[in-house]
Amino acid sequence: MFEALNLSCVRDERTLFSGLSFTIEPGEMVQIEGRNGAGKTSLLRILAGLSSPEVGEVRWQGVNTRRQRDVFHQQLLYLGHHPGVKSVLTAYENLAFYLSISGQSVNGTTGADAIYQALENVGLLGYEDVTVAQMSAGQQRRVALARLWLSEAPLWILDEPLTAIDKQGVATLIELFEQHAQQGGMVLLTTHQDLQGVNRDVRKIRLTSAELA
Ligand SMILES: Nc1ncnc2c1ncn2[C@@H]1O[C@H](COP(=O)(O)OP(=O)(O)OP(=O)(O)O)[C@@H](O)[C@H]1O
């Protein structure tokens, strides 16, 4: 179980949200909604442990994530606004790097097959030896998203995962999110798009601040 307890976030002396509490259970998909600047990215960064809240705490399996950073980060896949892939590495090398830091086997056919399959899933088969620096913004984003197919982490925190992705790609990703939740995973995401074609409940949490209302 993943819990946000009484979170407050202040940026530039402006309170983006306060007293925010919610729980995510295995099998749930949750969408954070809010206008531009409402604080969605700020919230996701706090939840992923990349920044601190003004007040409140985040718990994984009942324990504050700050007291078990390594354990928590093994359970988490966070994809931020920016692709977060290494531009000097090829698509294949980026995914091999991801497998190795998440403690999975890279060597041998299993690791290689998984990487090729992930690249195929994001429409990048044939680009495995192209460095990320030579790719378009959408392709770079797809390399980052390919990690979702390689992830064994139960908790996915995804900031605008559907941005710069074409219609077919969006449908494929939504199917993957559903499959992850179906298998007992948790998906927490922001998107300004309607999640069309989702066959399960998506719980919505709306961020509204006094200044934006
Ligand atoms: N590190 C920071 N220092 C100061 N202000 C920040 C910082 N990060 C975010 N902000 C401010 O906090 C507010 C919320 O930003 P955030 O990126 O969380 O919003 P968002 O809801 O994700 O917006 P969008 O939908 O446009 O992506 C903005 O006014 C932004 O300028």
Image (spheres, helix red, strand yellow):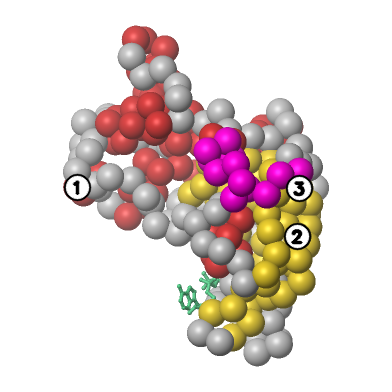
As shown in the figure, which amino acid type bears the numbered disc 2? Leu
Asked where in the image residue 10 lies, by quadrant, the reply is bottom right
Cβ(mark 1) to ligand 1 < 8 Å?
no
Residue at 46%, 30% in the rendered image? 102
Label 1: how many Cα within 10 Å (few below 14, some 14–19, many 20+): few
Q: Residue at x 37, y 41 (%)?
A: 143
Left or right: residue 212 compared with residue 162: right
- Where disc 2 sits, the SS reads strand
Q: CA distance from mark 2 to mark 1?
A: 42 Å
Q: Which amino acid does the dot numbered 1 rest on?
A: Gln
Residue 45 spot, x, y in % from top left: 54, 59
Per the rendering, the mark at residue 134 is: 1
Q: How far apart, in angstroms, are the residues tagged by discs 3 and 1?
A: 38 Å
Percent position (x, y) of residue 139?
34, 47
In the foreground, 46 or 181: 46
Q: Earlier in the sequence, mark 3 or mark 2?
A: 2
User: Disc 3 or disc 2, which is closer to the eye?
Assistant: 2
Q: Is residue 68 visible?
A: yes
Assess mark 2: CB under 8 A from ligand 1?
no
Q: Nearer the viewer, residue 164 or 151?
A: 151
Q: Can you give x and y, in whole percent of width and height, for residue 43 in the image?
A: 60, 64
Q: Which residue is mark 2?
A: 5
Is residue 59 within the magenta segment? no
Q: Position of residue 206 (x, y in %)?
A: 73, 69
Q: Which mark is residue 69?
A: none
Q: Secondary structure at mark 1?
A: helix
Q: Disc 2 vs disc 1: which is toward the camera? A: 2
Residue at x 45%, y 51% (from the top left corner): 165
Stretch of the chain drawn in magenta: 62-73
Question: For mark 3, what is the residue?
Answer: 24
- Which of the two discs, 3 and 1, labels the residue nearer the N terminus? 3
Is 20 placed left or right of 15 in the picture?
right
